[in-house]
Amino acid sequence: MITTSYFAQLKHIENPLSICGRAPDWYTGPQYKMLAPKYWFFKEYKEGNIDQDKYTELFIKHVLVPLDAQQVYNYLCAEYGRNVTLLCYEKPGDFCHRHIVANWFNNNLNIKVEELKFNKGDALWK
């Protein structure tokens, strides 16, 4: 099962995979930048020049449309295992590209990708 989470919970994640353009300097785990936002629209969003809807539109158009969801899923499972957790920076309730990726897998492959739930610092796996 592919799940999602954020770097602050890394110590509770067994099989992390960064999908950011740039992971934290202290992160030494694997990275899969094919699912990372393009710097130019990421910067526009962070500077407040585009909203979440425009960011989502650009992310889908420039990151996800060129990819084949089944090929990406097969690659992730083969390379990183079926229990991989896709990571980025934002907390679960915040707008984030990992949620767009999760929806992409769900919409294209009918694969439910859920956010890991944590309780008192311990990862609870669903």
Image: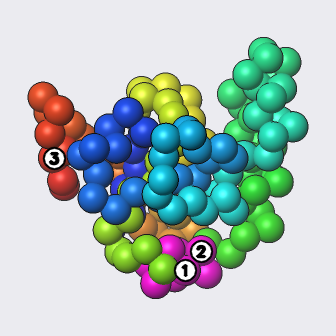
Q: Is residue 109 above or below residue 88?
A: below
Q: Pinpoint residue 39: horizontal percent, then vertical percent.
A: 81, 40
**Labelled disc at residue 65:** none
Q: Residue at x 24, y 46 (%)?
A: 12
Across and down, in percent, residue 36 comes to: 67, 51
List the residue tagged with mark 2: 72
- For residue 125, side relative to residue 43 (left or right): left
Q: Which residues are the magenta region?
A: 71-78
Q: Disc 2 to disc 1, how far (Cα)?
A: 5 Å
Q: Can you identify the residue that label 1 sits on?
A: 75
The reply, left or right, for residue 84 in relation to residue 98 is left
N-terminal of the two: label 3 or label 2? 2
Q: Are marks 2 and 1 in contact (CB under 8 Å)?
A: yes
Disc 2 residue crowd, few under 14, some 14–19, many 20+, Cα 10 Å: some
Which SS type dominates the magenta stretch? helix
Residue at figure coordinates x 24%, y 41% from the top left: 117
Which quadrant holds residue 15? bottom left
Disc 3 marks which residue?
124
Front residue (pair 23, 45): 23
